[in-house]
Image (spheres, coloured by chain):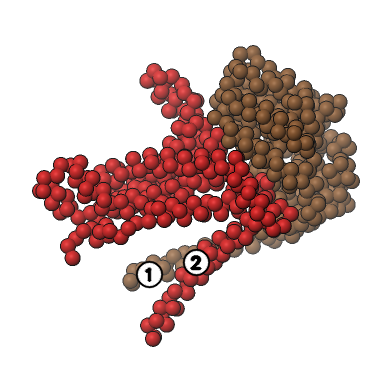
Chain colours: A red, B brown
Amino acid sequence: MNKSRLRSIYSIPYTAWILLFVLAPIALIVYYSFFDLAGNFTLANYRNFFTSVYLKLTISSFWYAFLITLFSLLIAYPTAYLITKTKHKQLWLLLIIIPSWINLLLKTYAFIGLMGLYGPLNAFLEAVGIGKQQILFTDFSFVFVSVYIFIPFMILPIFNALDKLNPALIDASRDLGADSWTTFRRVIWPLTTNGVKSGIQVVFIPALSLFMITRLIAGNKIITLGTAIEQQFLVTQNWGMGSTIAVFLIVFMFIIMLVTKGKEKGASDNGKAR
Amino acid sequence: MKSIIQSAILILIVSGILLFINAELNKGSKSGTGTITVYNWGEYIDPDLIKQFEEETGIKVIYETFDSNEGMMSKIEQGGTAYDISVPSEYMIEMMKEKNLLLPIDYSKIPNIKHIDPYFLDLPFDPGNQFSVPYFWGTVGIAYNPTLLEGQTFESWDDLWDPSLKQRVILVDSARETIGMGLNSLGYSLNSTDLGELREATDKLKMLSPNVKAVIGDEVTQLMVNSEAAVSLTWSGQAADMMYENEDIDYVVPEEGSNLWFDNIVIPKTAKNIDGAHAFINFMLDPEVAAQNADYVGYSTPNLSALDLMDPEVVEDERFYPDVETRSHLEVYKNLGLELLGVYNELFLEFKMDMK
């Protein structure tokens, strides 16, 4: 009796936090999404979302978020694997994490300089004989900079999963005659999918709503849902429409969370004998 | 556990000391006539003048910047910060008046108003200048770098559509300027409320897509200065900034017409130090201050007495100080209301989605 009362006292901060900073804002967003500019109740915002402009916007947001996640994963997995094999794991990990402490805008501005027509990247291309290229304001620059920004968030969960992996399992796989590829496919990958899934969550969802980079690096040639929300709130002052886009963004997030939900299958206990 | 408690106590002590020092520092400066909070566009004042104002009056200035009229207004509307001064453009003043967000100006406290060119007073957006005092004015046009081009000139907006400019034009990330450029090129009004005309302008803009290198904000200045971009749609003062650092750049207002705009100083409803705000306005209208400010910022000053103190070469430059006759061909933005602002922005979004 006493114990359960103590527990309910402990849960006050958590419940208050969830109510005030998670549930209440979401409820407000949903509420605002039903009003038009004049403050009348309407479903027009939702109808408007399904017009060609916003649908196209959603599709292109998903496409770029997919590309960013894919490339992050392709780079992060081997990197995380390599780090688990090094002598000073924590040091290498720290070196990858440190840049994520620097302000995002500062890093983005640095890339404007690096990728400019007279920047070091183009100087290199010219020296190699390829010649000057327009790098800034292209799909390439956008995906590159975004992947650079998100990669630490992809490496961390994968590193943790790989690090927890019991090496005896790999030895066992080898002893039973599996080659490296089979070991990876049948043992390492299945046991680290939870790390990969949480990596995908922390990259894909923010990538859907990236803004600022879309303007500074992509020159507004790529527009994401985040940019559209910002415009609706700050420029058009149409809070209803902005909220409606936000509602869809939240729905997409839930879908992604459901799809990438980790199945509690051996990964957490590393398949250690029980 | 013990070390955690120790470090927690240490952090608390350090924060307490910092808080105390901060409070002491603020106390010292509040001995004058208090503080005012100025909310202005980025790069829109000579920082030395703020120091001069603080020294002369003993009023401490807290300075914050915004990058769009609309963003500025929504912050003032929500009232989180006590802004004493802001500098909206003419159509926004109209909108803020409608929403009762402005305080009337007491001209007995602003004797320097006599220096302002009467042309800029009593304009339709604020009859009798009840709520606003002229700060700067200018136009929208094309800044270009002839050394990067093959002899193209920009007498007409249509010159931007020239196939030789593939991937070389930078547009400004603002719906009214960019859609307005499309409207101007077709000979329509910048304040068009005709959906057919707006559609036509958007379709014409879409044909510009292959020439567009990017749609960005203030970053364009650096790109032009570094010869990274050849042509950009921009405001006159921003062009002046570019020309100040890169002499090759030129600025032109195409002959179909363009936008003539005014940025005026206002006292928003959020103001706490109304006397301080008046003192600030009067200070900014002082001819010497206005001349120094115009020299630094690069936009055109409405202050007649200041013009006499400035470099004649600048003041006689028709590109930045077009005469009254030329100005009559230019159009001032009207407040179109939120509904149409939404339409402009949706069309602008459609244009941006179409680029590539």
Give the secondary structure at mark 2.
helix
Q: Residues within 10 Å of mark 2 (few under 14, many from 20)?
A: few
> x, y percentage for residue B109?
85, 52
* Extreme residue toward the bottom, this view: A1
SS for tag 1? Answer: helix
Q: Amino acid at mark 1?
A: Gln
* Residue B102 visible somewhere in the drawing: no
- Image coordinates of residue A39 in percent, x first then y, are 72, 57
Tell me what residue is drawn at x 60 percent, y 20 percent. B165
* Point 23% across, 54% down: residue: A165
Residue A12 in sight here: yes
Name the residue beneath numbered marker 2.
Answer: A18
What amino acid does circle 2 point to?
Ile
What residue is drawn where x is 47% and y is 55%? A254
Determine whether, in the image, residue A75 is placed left or right of residue B282.
left
Split into 4 quadrants, where in the image is the C terminus of chain B? top right
- Marks 2 and 1, how far apart in space? 31 Å
Image quadrant containing the N terminus of chain B: bottom left
Parent chain of label 2: A
Name the residue that disc number 1 marks.
Answer: B6
Residue found at x 42% / y 82%: A5
| In this rendering, the label closer to the viewer, 2 or 1 | 2
